Image: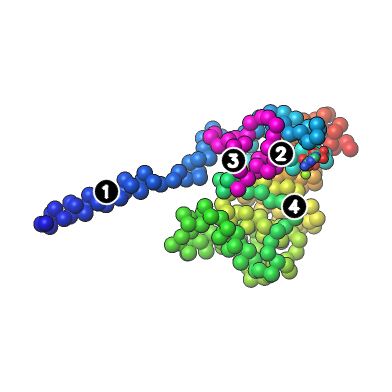
Amino acid sequence: MNKTTSKRARRGLIERDRVFEFLIEKPTRDSLVDTGHGNILYLEDITVTFDGFKALNELTLYVETGELRCIIGPNGAGKTTMMDVITGKTRPDYGTAFYGQRLDLLRLSEPEIADLGIGRKFQKPTVFGSHTVFENLELAMAADKRVWPTLFSKMSGEQRDGLDEVLELIGLVEKVHTAAETLSHGQKQWLEIGMLIMQNPLVLLVDEPVAGMTKQEMETTAELLTNLAGERSVVVVEHDMEFVRSIARRVTVLHEGRVLAEGNMNAIQSDPKVIEVYLGS
Ligand SMILES: Nc1ncnc2c1ncn2[C@@H]1O[C@H](COP(=O)(O)OP(=O)(O)O)[C@@H](O)[C@H]1O
Ligand SMILES: [Mg+2]
């Protein structure tokens, strides 16, 4: 085999490998979650019945890509049930729920939905107390089986940069080597938000983030959630009106399982329907 042929043969093999790689490459998450039409969540006519009682009653709600949305409403309005439907924990009796243009949430399992980038923060922080802030963030990243091999393998520098970025975002740079159990209530909540961010979600659902927080902690949380939006979409369920006022762009008021009103805080607060069922009480 002369030099030219062997070179050509080698090029042929490289070419073949490239085609092969292309064929077996899995679609990326972001190509699956097609947000080309501006919204990231589409809920339509979602109805959930518990023993004949409609916790959600033909709920229709859209969330824009990158938006920070606040959901308020009296106890029992269906806020948590709505999050349960989005995350696949509860299946509605009927209605449709889409994540981007193509992904039918009602056909995906709870772990699949989480893997595809819908992260949820529950009220009670679930950090690993005896581990440091750093270790908690590291564990959260390692737990993400989808991002781990693709985004971070062979890139420990980049991995570390990502972790540092999150540390800064959640305001715990100074606490990086502190055991999580010694953090304040607010700091634990931020760490847990940080752990969610380590998994690189496209949507972050946050249920009552400021319950039990001091005024100062509430302000920091408002800033954190505001900073998180844009790159991600953030949906915050919250009771505290002052907090909602401090962060809200668009507010949705739920009542009896459906949307009662939607708009900016001023419009909401002067809406007679809202005053009657929520603010007036
Ligand atoms: N698993 C369940 N079984 C029976 N009823 C439920 C269940 N989950 C929620 N509910 C009822 O559905 C309604 C809506 O609850 P929820 O979504 O938790 O409201 P919110 O979060 O707005 O306070 C409430 O009346 C609640 O009691
Ligand atoms: Mg609730």
Q: Quadrant of the C terminus?
A: top right
Residue shown at 75% from the left, 48% from the top: 208
Q: Which residue is mark 2?
A: 82
The answer to the question of whether label 2 and label 1 lie on touching residues, with beta carbons closer than 8 A, is no
Q: CA distance from mark 1 to mark 4?
A: 52 Å
Mark toward the start of the polypeptide (3 vs 1): 1
Closer to the camera in the image, 277 or 100: 100
Q: Nearer the viewer, mark 2 or mark 3?
A: 3
Check disc 4 and give the amino acid type.
Gln
- Residue 15: assigned label: 1
Hey, what amino acid is under mark 2? Met
| Badge 3 element | loop
The residue that mark 4 highlights is: 123
Residue interval drawn in magenta: 84-111
Where is residue 176? Give x, y as percent.
63, 68
Q: Residue at x 55, y 37 (%)?
A: 103
- Determine which quarter of the picture holds residue 237: top right
Tell me: is circle 2 under 8 Å from ligand 1: yes
